[in-house]
Image (cartoon, rainbow, N blue to C red):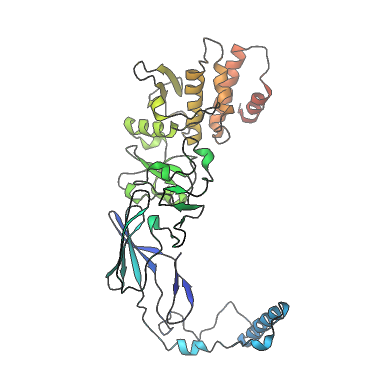
Amino acid sequence: MPYYQSNTLKHALCSNSFPLSRSEGEVLERICSKLGGGLDKAIVPVDSSVVAIEEPYATRAGELQDMVLRNMDCVNINSEYTTIDSHFSILDYLKTVNNPENNLYFYHSDHLGSSSFITDADGIVSQHLQYLPYGELFAEQRDNTARYYTPYKFSGKEKDEETGYSYFGARYYMSDVSVWLSVDPMADDYPHLSPYNYCENKPIVLIDKYGLSTSPVFDEAGTYLGTDNEGFKGTPLIFSQKDKDKFKQGMDHKEAQKIGKEFSPNLRLGKDALNKIFNKIIEGTIFPNGHVLKSNEFEAHVENMPTANARYNGRNQKTREHDVSLDIGDYEWTVENIRATAVHEIYGHGIKNWGDDSKSHHKCYFSEIDSKYWSGSTERYKNHCVKNMWGYYSKEIRVKPLPKKYDVEYRKNIRR
């Protein structure tokens, strides 16, 4: 949030930046402004009463003055050095003044929100910046007569001139060497990535608004657009082809929900789009043994299966990838549900070779409960899993009771 020293009122003003217009690939945003000096054009007359203050102004002003003096005495400051104008006489002057503000600047950002051009109130360029992919400043040109140069550079974040660090909110980023100065607070959700990496190593298409990892957004073709600010969890959002340009990396989750629709069978997405979405979400799944699933280790695809919601098809003979079929119509496909299913199919059936033939199919359900995704899975999904777990366990083990951990989850989540 930029600060500006007013030449008229001699006060430090803090002005929120906000978009003024948007065109394809460019956002124009005011970053340094004030509304001029004086109150001659004020919407509410300066002399009008404030309804919220019911007591006489003189009484209220006196009480405020007494409070200030008491506080000063408390810290041993002699009140004789203090002068308080309880009548705010400066207002009598300001209400006759209407000075225009000449120090008005706009920044023109690129598709990542980085400052590219800074222009003044007359549209004259005062500063031009270009960046390397990870934010290192490639070129900067300045008009030596300009009165303002922006500190808000790569990704629209303030860059400290002394240290060269950019502040993102959750942590500092050093663009010259393309790393964060501290670990990602949400690094546990991304063990396959360095906790110091910037934007999953995709700096040309993604931004990190706060220095945190975030949740998945796709378009109707299944193309991964990026993430909002909710964390990689919950129901993926699908933006229409018409609205996908409205997506901004790290955007507010509520704003993203207004534009996109939750991932469900009702969207009637094409098979190719569904395959791309499932494969993107399954990538990075963490197995109970700590292994992180890579994209070249599996292939998932959608298939209509009347008797199952997922099926492990074995390994591809050529690529040796684990082949998995999924049916989107059976229950909610949240990130947690999808990844828990991947644990069952790829880790349980594929890597551990658990299944009906060895009377160990129930262990695939055990592995889901053991995974980090179980606690975040939906109630309907958990009910489905524990019901099947008990069905296979009672058939394969028969008289032995469920181990305590799984018995607890069964009793907690079963709906009869």
Residue 197: quarter of image: top left
Q: Nearer the viewer, residue 149 or 234?
A: 149
Residue 312 is situated, as x and y percent measured from the top left of the image, at 44, 19
Q: Quadrant of residue 128?
A: bottom left
93, above or below 103, in the image? below
What residue do we see at 44% from left, 31% from top? 282
Q: Residue at x 38, y 50 (%)?
A: 248
Residue 77 or residue 234, whichever sits in front: 77
> Residue 189 location, x and y as percent?
51, 38
Residue sitting at 41 percent across and 48 percent down? Answer: 178
- Where in the figure is residue 133, as x and y percent of width and height? 34, 48
Quadrant where the C terminus lies? top right
Can residue 165 be seen in this snapshot?
A: yes
The picture quadrant where one finds residue 140 is: bottom left
Task: Judge whether 393 appears above or below 58 on screen.
Answer: above
Relative height, residue 249 to residue 331 (above, below): below
Exactly how many numbered labels are in the figure? 0
Of residues 131 and 220, which is closer to you in this image?
131
Q: Residue at x 49, y 90 (%)?
A: 92
Whether residue 243 is visible to the viewer of this picture, yes or no, is no
Q: Is 114 displayed left or right of 382 in the figure?
A: left
